[in-house]
Image: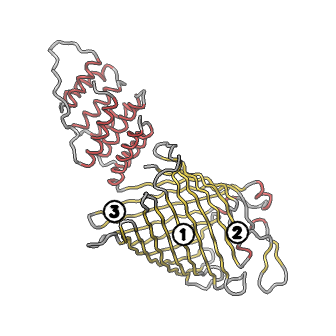
Amino acid sequence: MVSSCTADRLRALLFSLSLLGLFPVAAAMAQTASVPEEGLVLTPDAMRQLARAYLVDGQPGQTIGLTEALLARDADDVTALLLRAEAEVVTENFPAAVGFAGRAFNSATTNGERFAAARLVALSQAKQGHYTRAQFWLRRAGQVAPTPEARQAVAEDYAIVRRRNPLAISLSFGIAPSSNVNGGSLSEVLILPGLPFEFVLDGEARALSGIQISGGVNLTYRLHVDENSATFVDARFYGRTYALSAQAKEMAPDAKGSDYADYSIYGTLTHRWLTEGASGPWTAALSGGQTWYGQEPYLRFIQASIGREFRATDFDRLNLGLFAEYQNRIEEGDAFPNIGARGRWVHELDQGDDVGLFVSVRDSLTDIADVGFQGLTVSASYDFDKPVGNFDIGLSADLDYQSFPVSAYTYGAREDITTGVSVILGLNNIQYYGFEPLITLTASQTQSNADLFDSADLSVDFGIRSSF
C-alpha cells in the first residue's frame, strides 16, 4: 500500500509537471497488479489496494470499475473518491475529476486527505483552463498542508497557475489608528497676509484622531501576450473612511468620519514590449478615473505615460518614465494639465537584500491659488531578503517638497516640506489560506511657511497580503 506521504509527494510532482506539459499524468509507476481469480471475493481494503495498483500501472479503466463498486457500498469512501478522481484525471475527464475530488474534500476527516483532494481539484480546474478556480483550491490546499515542504509545493504550483491565468485579482484591507485622519493643522490659529488679527481654527480644521478603515480591489486581465509583448487592462477601486475618536468628537462635535472619506475608481490600458537586444521592456499606459471626497465627486483625470525598464548591471535595475495628465476639479470647475518624470533604482546586495531609490518631479501647469505647484519627491527603501525572526521587514523614508507660486495664505510662494518614515512588518509565521498579516508603522510631518498646513500624523496600519 502506497504511504500517504509518498502519495502526497507524487501528486505534487505530477501537478507541477503536468501544468508545464513536461510529464503525462498517466506515467507508469509500478508493475501491473495480479488480476484476481474469478469468483474471488475481495474485501473493501483489498479493492482499494488493487484500484491503486491498476492506477499506477496505467490502467485507469480498471480503477474506475473498482471504485464504482466501492462508492456504491459507501458514497463517502474518501480513498475511493480520491482514486476515482485520479483515474478521471488520467483519462482526461476533468469535470468528473473535479466532482469526485470535491466530494473527497467534503468527506475527508484528516488534513492529509483534504490536502490531496484540494490538489486534485486544482489540477483538474487548471487543466480545463479555469485558473482562478484552481488558485482558490490551491489556497485551500495550502491551508491544510501537512508539512512545510507541502506548503512550499503549493506555493510553487500557485505561481505556475498565476502565470497561466489571464486574470489577476488583488484584494487589500486595512485598519489603522491615526493621530490625524483629516490632514488637519497642528496650529490653533490662522494668520492671513495683510490682516492684523488672528483667526481661531475650528475643530474640523485641526488634526483629529481616529481609526482609518480601507479596502480595495484590483482586477488585471491579460489581453495579449507573445514572446516580445503583452497587453493588459486594469480596473481598480480603492476606498477609505474613518471613525473619529472621543477626543476628536469633543473637538469637532458636528464632524463625522465619513466627512473625510475618499474613494477612487479608475482603469488602465498597458502595453509592454521588448526591443531586440534590450535588457528590459518599454511600457506605455493610458489611465483614467475619478475620485470622491466626503461622498461628493472631487476629481477626474486622464493620464498617459511611457517608461523603460532595464538592467544597468547584474545587481542594478533602473526604471525611468515620463507622464502627462489632465485633471478636472469637479466642484470648482477647474481643469488643468500636469507633467512629470520619475525614476527608480534598485540595487541587490550580496546577501540578497534590496536597496531602492525613487525620484519624481511634477509640475501643475496652472496658476490657481494653492492648487498649482512644482514638486519633488525622493524616497529611499530597504527590503530584507530573508525574515528577521518571524518578520518580513521593509523600511522606507520619504521627502516631498511642494512649492505653490500663488497662495492665499502667504506672501509670495507657499512651500511645504513633508518627511516620513515607514516600517513594514509581515508576520510570516501566521498563514491563513495563503495570506499573512501585515503591519505598517508610519510617521509623517509637514512643515509649511503657512501655519494652516503644518501637520503631523502617526499611524499603525493592520492589513493582509498574499504570501504566494
Which residue sits furthest front?
A: 350
Does residue 405 sit above or below 127 in this rendering? below
Q: Which mark is residue 455?
A: 2
Q: Earlier in the sequence, mark 2 or mark 1?
A: 1
Does residue 434 sit above or below 423 in this rendering? above
- Quadrant occupied by the N terminus: top left
Nearest to the observer: residue 317 or residue 112: 317
Q: Secondary structure at mark 1?
A: strand
Q: Earlier in the sequence, mark 3 or mark 1?
A: 3
Nearest to the observer: residue 170 or residue 317: 317
Q: How far is the residue under mark 3 from the one under mark 1?
A: 33 Å
Q: Amino acid at mark 3?
A: Leu
Q: Position of residue 131 (x, y in %)?
A: 35, 49
Question: Where, by quadrant of the figure, is residue 244 drawn?
Answer: bottom right
Q: How far is the residue under mark 2 from the one under mark 1?
A: 20 Å
Closer to us: mark 2 or mark 1?
1
Which residue in the structure is indicated by mark 1? 379
Does residue 140 sit above or below 251 in this rendering? above
Q: Which mark is residue 223?
A: 3
Closer to us: mark 2 or mark 3?
2
Residue in view at x 32 percent, y 44 percent = 125
Q: Position of residue 374 (x, y in %)?
A: 58, 81
Question: Where, by quadrant of the figure, is residue 35 drawn?
Answer: top left
Residue in view at x 63 percent, y 82 percent = 404
